[in-house]
Amino acid sequence: MNTNTIQIWYGDIAAEDAHYQSYWRVLDAAEQAHAVKIKNELLHKRYVAVHGRLRTVLAQILNEPPKKIRISKAEHGKPYLADNPQLAFNLSHSASMMIIAVGWRCQLGVDVELCKPRANLAGLVDKCFAEEEVEYWRKLPGHQKIPEFYRFWTRKEAFVKATGRGIGLGLDHCVINPENPVEFLRVPESCGHASAWRVLDLDLGAGVCSALAVDREFTGVRLMDLATILSKL
């Protein structure tokens, strides 16, 4: 893996019941215990598939058995690799769509959302967007409001996930430049300079919005299909 390239693994995990046992076997004891507590069968199977896939991706990059990878959690709950902290990773899933971002020596976050109508869209914009973003969004034609909401939302989510703080950091405090959405106008002081961060929209197909946020320059993004690593389990 090129250390200046961010790998993006993505795929649909809607119909993976046949691989359930393979995914289950690579989870550690804590993940299995958490999965057992999920009583909804669909959510249980998705949890197992998501974390089994994550371990398989990390195992391929590190050339280690998936079961032996130690995933710990930082102060605010962001997962990291206890034995390989220089390899950053983050995952997101929406319904059956899953995405994993992996990069070296950086902070990174990724988010994916299915673009669907929401009754409280304007209220979420007022609550979670900064003044510049609200003004931009309100001026959009009606047919652009839903997709643009999700583009801004996933960019912001990717950023707060990269910092390890999550939504508690305040989505309205990380401000995307509406005129140049690959850059931030402002971020919280504790997150460094806004100019150090990069944000990138990811094209994962119609009806899906996804974004990547990274705290340094990178030379490229490589999109990878999760289906290609089923044989690695």
Image (cartoon, rainbow, N blue to C red):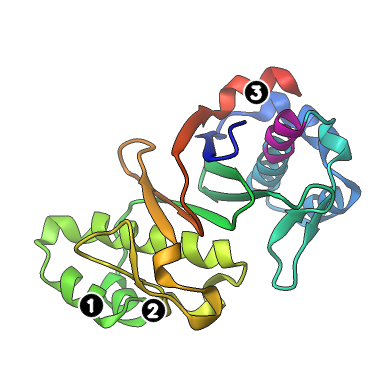
- How many residues crowd mark 1 within 10 Å: few (<14), some (14–19), many (20+)? few
Say whether residue 216 is left or right of residue 79: left
Considering only vertical position in the picture, is 5 above or below 167? above
SS of the residue at dot 3? helix
Callout 2: SS: helix
* Residue 208 at x, y percent in the picture: 36, 44
Task: Determine which residue is flagged by label 1.
Answer: 132
Q: Which residues are magenta?
A: 54-62
On residue 191, the disc is: none
Residue at the outermost top position = 231
Instruction: Say left or right for 100 vs 116.
Output: right
Q: CA distance from mark 1 to mark 3?
A: 42 Å
Residue under numbered circle 3:
229
- The image shows residue 18, relative to residue 101, as above or below, that is above
Residue bearing mark 2: 172
Give amino acid for label 2. Answer: Asp
Q: Quadrant of residue 165?
A: bottom right
Q: Give the percent coordinates (x, y) of residue 138.
A: 15, 73
Task: Judge the density around disc 3: few (<14), some (14-19), many (≥20) Cα neighbours within 10 Å.
Answer: some
- Taking depth in this image into account, of 170 and 17 the one nearest to the observer is 170
Compare marks 2 and 3 and give the one earlier in the sequence. 2
Q: Disc 1 on helix, strand or loop? A: helix
